[in-house]
Amino acid sequence: MKAKLVIGLFLLFFTACVPVESIETRLRLNGGERWQAHLEFMLAPESVMFTSELDQMLDSEMANVEQQGVKFSWRKEEPDRDGKINYILDFSGQGYDQLNSGLFSQNAISVDEETGNIIFSAFSDYGQMTGAGASKFILQGGRIISTNGNQINRGTVEWLNPTGRMEAELTAGSGFNWFWLLFILLVGGGGFAAYWFIFRKSPTTAVPAVSSSGGVPQPGQVRYCAECGAQMQAGSKFCPECGAAQHT
């Protein structure tokens, strides 16, 4: 059973008419059947005349997939100095059935009932398309258990110019953004350091002690705390600043 991205319909249209310089698809599978799909493809300079038609197709597709509960956004970058145009598409949703029906033509993603692992099996014939350029498909999750692709790290596998079946067994990713954790730790640590430096390291300013008559003590009526050095009334048993007991 073959499985293709619905976006492949756009690519099929364009590779049949004009060259596609490159295409990269990135699919991330998280826990709770949450998923994210990111697709970038670059059109050759001679494809500029077709971009308005592609824009209309993408706007129409946005309305269709959002009716299925899939979040979809796309943008087109300005042509580079060589006149190449890059399109960026982002999808996200929850439910592998939704992913299969919304982005794949067949059930490319399933869950093993015994192990709970995700089974990915999708057929790609992009490399056989006329005018197709470099192609890359990247699959991300928690841990890659087995695959016929090129495993990049513990949770990432890729296929370059795939022609045939792409297969992998993996666990779901956490979907946790470690960047924000690092950001919070850095900001929180910086704030604590600033507090310690300003309030704990600043020298204590001695405040003249007030006599029982309400005035400032005269020479001979004052003494200084043995612990913090604050000025205090002679005969006081405790420092009014730090509370340390005074030895008479």
Image (spheres, rainbow, N blue to C red):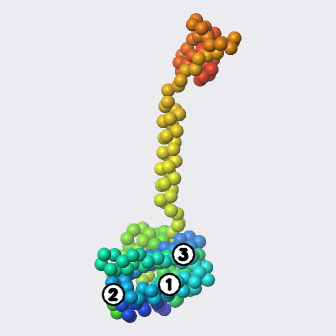
| Image marks 1 and 2: residues in contact by CB distance under 8 Å | no
Mark 1 / mark 3, whichever is N-terminal = 1
Count neighbours of disc 1 (C-alpha within 10 A) and say few if under 14, some if 14 to 19, many if 20 or more: some
The quadrant of the rendering that contains the C terminus is top right
Check disc 2 and give the amino acid type: Glu
Q: Which residue is mark 1?
A: 58
Mark 1 / mark 2, whichever is N-terminal = 2
Can residue 111 be seen in the rendering of this structure?
no
Q: Is residue 77 left or right of residue 106?
A: left
Q: Which residue is mark 3?
A: 92
Farthest left residue in view: 82
Can residue 45 be seen in the rendering of this structure?
yes
* Secondary structure of the residue carrying numbered label 2: helix
Q: Which residue is mark 2?
A: 46
Farthest right residue in view: 213
Quadrant in which residue 222 is drawn: top right
Residue at 48% x, 92% y: name it: 1
In this rendered view, identify the residue nearer to me: 16 or 170: 16
151 is higher (above) or lower (below) than 226: below
64 is higher (above) or lower (below) than 138: below
Marks 1/3: CA distance?
A: 16 Å
Give coordinates of residue 206: x percent, y percent. Answer: 55, 21
In this rendered view, identify the residue nearer to me: 63 or 93: 63
Farthest top residue in view: 220
Count neighbours of disc 2 (C-alpha within 10 A) and say few if under 14, some if 14 to 19, many if 20 or more: few
* Secondary structure of the residue carrying numbered label 1: helix
Quadrant in which residue 134 is drawn: bottom left
